[in-house]
């Protein structure tokens, strides 16, 4: 249609071009479209007509100006698109004539155009038109590559870039928990660039792709069969298809021959909202993103206002009429029967008359209006427009960058610096109707302008593959529960892994943990290894069975010592008591009582005072005890020496000297203990190294030198006492105490020598128990060897408790 200004249009109304064998001996024929007609593409072309007609009838937009149009069919082929691009750029006729002046045809160039429907032809056109600054506004070319203004400076579009769609698809896959998917794409710029964006976004979301296959409808059939077999053999139950409408129809036809297991299809906008694909039942439950649906007032009446006479005015409309009604219009060259006038276009049910969605259709409507507003901005002022104004295409290009308006049906039109609109999608779900047919249902929305994490929203339930209401699962490996970590299987993607239990002392408290975390030192994992629990604290408590037994022995020993003291005190005048230095005997009984009782300080929870008390009390009382025994041993030796003629020994070791020796020996130990407590005292500490799963609360030695100095001093006195007693063992008295002291020291030394390895190797609270056992054993040994014989004579052999008997000589016996 002619007008003051002509707007170009190019749409994919057919899907193939006529094939021709190139002979190089004659000029090749002009490219021509062939194959079946895409009725939806025809609707796009007629929407452009409708929009221009609507603009021409407006008084606020381009008043007094009529727009014309020149619409071509690209048949989704690059050669045809390039040919049309040259025609739009320079106004040449379809055939070159060397008689025409090039300058004469230059005035036929269009200031702007709408189209194309596909990315690859649009890219070819944009490279040519961009050289002349002729703006191109596409309604359906979504390749993210077209946002590159260095390559395509004059390209705009009203449909969002695949960059946003790919990101939205990856987020949707992640949202539904699918980590193991298959991918198939068109082997074209649309499919390759779109899938590349999706795979990058999917990798960032932690999604693994089992396979990624490509196919184009003109490739050999063997390639199609191979792609179909890959899909059939795959273990992924979700497949993302970045395919054009024509490619997926061919692929689904091939899969229909030998259907794969039920798959959850995820579709790009190129086919997910194409009514022609709804006939494939294997895609029931498919979901994908489509541009928002719309309503265009008056469009339906315009499309249906078509008579046979009007159809004959255009070859495309003639083909549409004859294809729809399977008849031949009068004046047309083909057809089996002639149309008789009974054909009713309102009764047609095909994509041309389908007004239920109007998604891409609205994109054509917006693109046409955008060009009209740009022309208005160039030739019109506030009151009128200049019909005869001359302008260059780059002026329209400059105005397109600034357009910002709202269409009659309420959609805002604006472009960013890349020539792209704001990405807003509807989530489309293929749901089966009660009559068995399928329809598009909007179940959610996606808005790229919202903040991260808020772009995606659901509005109603999704019907999944097989009519299920639950989200299908598609994972290479099931989730690893808490208490385990993921270990990637060798040679497989990151989504294929084994679940390895956390190592000892480590936990993981969330699903699919990559690493286990070690518990703090005072905590230990529970059985499930999903949380850290405080380690049980272990010490020799009062209610422990072992503690009760040791306490009973300790109190019993102290009680017996007290009882023996009472017996000795009652019979203090008897010869056996007098003969064995009663003063040292009573002091020894007192010290043994303290030795029995000091073992009680080792029981119970360690504290600062108990730790310092237990070791010092033990060291001092035992030195006091050994000092008394040593004093008694020296007395025996001195007494024997005193019986020799001319001996004056006893005056040097009388009672005062005995008391002084005991005091001196004890004060040395007191000094050692004071130095130990001053420099580095024993304090309670938590032993975390002995056992991994529990804490041993014990008294640290502080200074190990101090501890071993205390024990060493006791050992030195015990060894000295043993040597002296051993030397006096054969003295010829009837009741020679040295023999019993020798036995007691032998037992004492044996107990403490065996104590050392037992103490070092005993675990936990048993370390303390070993020390208590050593104290009680050595105390009972001393008590039994030194006092038991005397008590036996006092209580049961009183006839031997006489001075005559004690002074009698006995035959020396080998010891």
Image (cartoon, grey):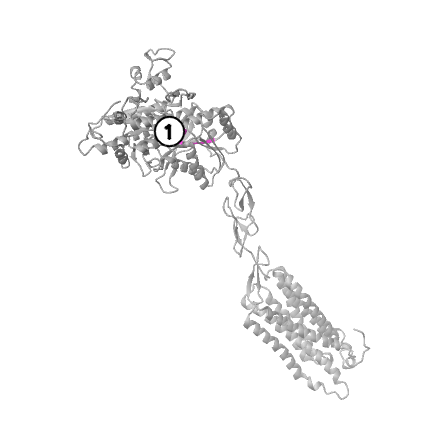
Q: Is residue 114 left or right of residue 65?
A: right
Q: Along the line of sight, which residue is nearer the eye, 328 or 119?
A: 119
Q: Along the line of sight, which residue is nearer the eye, 540 or 51?
A: 51
Q: Is residue 81 left or right of residue 634?
A: left
Q: Which residue lies furthest to the bottom in this view?
A: 646
Instruction: Estimate the x, y position of residue 439 in percent, counting from the top left.
Output: 40, 26
Tell me if residue 519 is in the magenta stretch.
no
Q: Report whether residue 356 is seen.
A: no
Q: Report whether residue 251 is seen.
A: yes
Instruction: Estimate the x, y position of residue 564 in percent, counting from the top left.
Output: 68, 73
Using the rendered view, name the quadrant where residue 749 is placed. Answer: bottom right
Please provide the residue range marked out in magenta: 264-273
Label 1: state its secondary structure. helix
Residue sitting at x 24%, y 24%: 3
Q: Residue furthest left?
A: 383
Query: To which residue does mark 1 refer?
Result: 121
742 to 130, vertically: above or below: below
Residue sitting at x 29%, y 15%: 309
Q: How crowded is mark 1: few (under 14 residues within 10 Å), some or many (20 or more)?
A: many
Q: Along the line of sight, which residue is nearer the eye, 107 or 723?
A: 107
Instruction: Estimate the x, y position of residue 226 in percent, counting from the top left.
Output: 51, 28
């Amino acid at each position: 249609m002619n007008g003051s200004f002509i707007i170009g249009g190019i749409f994919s109304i057919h899907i193939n071009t006529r094939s021709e064998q190139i002979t190089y001996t004659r000029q090749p024929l002009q490219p021509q479209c062939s194959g079946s007609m895409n009725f939806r593409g025809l609707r796009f072309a007629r929407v452009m007509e409708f929009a221009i007609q609507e603009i021409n009838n407006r008084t606020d937009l381009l008043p007094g100006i009529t727009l014309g149009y020149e619409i071509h069919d690209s048949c989704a082929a690059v050669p045809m698109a390039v040919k049309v691009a040259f025609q739009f750029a320079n106004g040449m006729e379809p055939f070159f004539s060397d008689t025409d002046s090039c300058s004469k045809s230059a005035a036929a160039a269009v200031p702007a155009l709408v189209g194309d429907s596909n990315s690859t032809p649009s890219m070819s056109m944009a490279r040519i038109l961009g050289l002349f600054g002729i703006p191109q506004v596409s309604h359906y070319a979504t390749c993210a590559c077209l946002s590159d203004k260095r390559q395509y400076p004059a390209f705009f579009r009203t449909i969002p870039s695949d960059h946003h769609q790919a990101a939205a698809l990856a987020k949707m896959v992640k949202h539904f928990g699918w980590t193991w998917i298959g991918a198939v794409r068109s082997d074209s710029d649309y499919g390759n660039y779109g899938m590349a964006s999706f795979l990058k976004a999917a990798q960032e979301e932690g999604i693994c792709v089992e396979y990624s296959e490509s196919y184009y409808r003109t490739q050999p059939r063997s390639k199609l069969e191979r792609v179909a077999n890959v899909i059939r053999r795959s273990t992924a139950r979700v497949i993302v298809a970045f395919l054009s409408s024509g490619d997926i129809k061919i692929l689904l036809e091939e899969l229909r021959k030998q259907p794969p297991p039920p798959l959850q299809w995820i579709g790009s906008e190129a086919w997910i909202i194409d009514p022609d694909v709804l006939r494939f039942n294997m895609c029931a439950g498919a979901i994908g993103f489509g541009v928002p649906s719309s309503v265009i007032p008056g469009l339906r009446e315009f499309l249906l206002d078509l008579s046979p006479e009007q159809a004959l005015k255009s070859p495309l409309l003639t083909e549409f009429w004859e294809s729809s009604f399977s008849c031949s219009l009068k004046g047309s060259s083909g057809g089996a029967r002639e149309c008789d006038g009974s054909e009713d276009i309102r009764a047609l049910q095909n994509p041309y008359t389908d007004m239920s969605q109007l998604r891409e259709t609205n994109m054509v409507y917006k693109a046409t209006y955008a060009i009209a507003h740009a022309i208005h901005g160039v030739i019109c002022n506030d009151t009128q427009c200049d019909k005869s104004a001359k302008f260059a295409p780059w002026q329209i290009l400059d105005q397109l960058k600034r357009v910002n308006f709202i269409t009659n049906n309420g959609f805002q039109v604006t472009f960013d610096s890349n020539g792209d609109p704001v990405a807003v999608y509807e989530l489309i779900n293929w749901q089966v109707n009660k009559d068995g047919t399928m329809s598009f249902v909007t179940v959610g929305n996606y808005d790229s302008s919202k903040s991260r994490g808020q772009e995606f929203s659901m509005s109603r339930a999704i019907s999944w593959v097989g009519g299920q209401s639950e989200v299908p699962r598609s994972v290479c490996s099931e989730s690893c529960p808490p208490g385990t970590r993921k270990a990637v299987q060798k040679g497989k993607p990151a989504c294929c892994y084994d679940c390895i239990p956390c190592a000892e002392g480590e936990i993981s408290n969330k699903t699919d943990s990559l690493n286990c975390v070690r518990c703090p030192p005072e905590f230990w994992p529970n059985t499930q290894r999903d949380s850290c629990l405080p380690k049980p604290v272990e010490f020799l408590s009062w209610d422990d069975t072992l503690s009760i037994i040791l306490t009973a022995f300790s109190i019993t020993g102290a009680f017996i010592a007290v009882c023996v003291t009472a017996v000795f005190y009652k019979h203090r005048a008897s010869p056996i008591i007098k003969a064995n230095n009663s003063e040292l005997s009573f002091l020894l009984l007192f010290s043994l009582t303290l030795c029995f009782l000091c073992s009680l300080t080792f029981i119970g929870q360690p504290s600062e005072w108990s730790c310092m008390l237990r070791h010092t009390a033990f060291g001092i009382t035992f030195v006091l005890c050994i000092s008394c025994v040593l004093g008694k041993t020296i007395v025996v030796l001195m007494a024997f020496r005193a019986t020799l003629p001319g001996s004056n020994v006893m005056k040097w070791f009388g009672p005062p000297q005995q008391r002084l020796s005991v005091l001196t020996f004890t004060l040395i130990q007191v000094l050692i203990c004071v130095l130990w407590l001053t420099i580095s005292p024993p304090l309670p500490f938590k032993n975390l190294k002995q056992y991994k799963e529990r804490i041993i609360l014990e008294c640290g030695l502080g200074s190990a030198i101090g501890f071993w100095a205390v024990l060493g001093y006791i050992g030195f006195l015990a060894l000295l006492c043993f040597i002296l007693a051993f030397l006096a063992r054969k003295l010829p008295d009837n009741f020679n105490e040295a023999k019993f002291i020798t036995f007691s020291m032998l037992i004492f030394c044996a107990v403490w020598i065996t104590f050392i390895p037992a103490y070092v190797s005993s675990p936990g609270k048993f370390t303390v128990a070993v020390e208590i056992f050593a104290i009680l054993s050595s105390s009972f040994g001393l008590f039994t060897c030194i006092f038991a014989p005397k008590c036996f004579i006092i209580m049961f052999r009183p006839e031997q408790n006489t001075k005559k008997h004690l002074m009698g000589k006995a035959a020396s016996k080998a010891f």
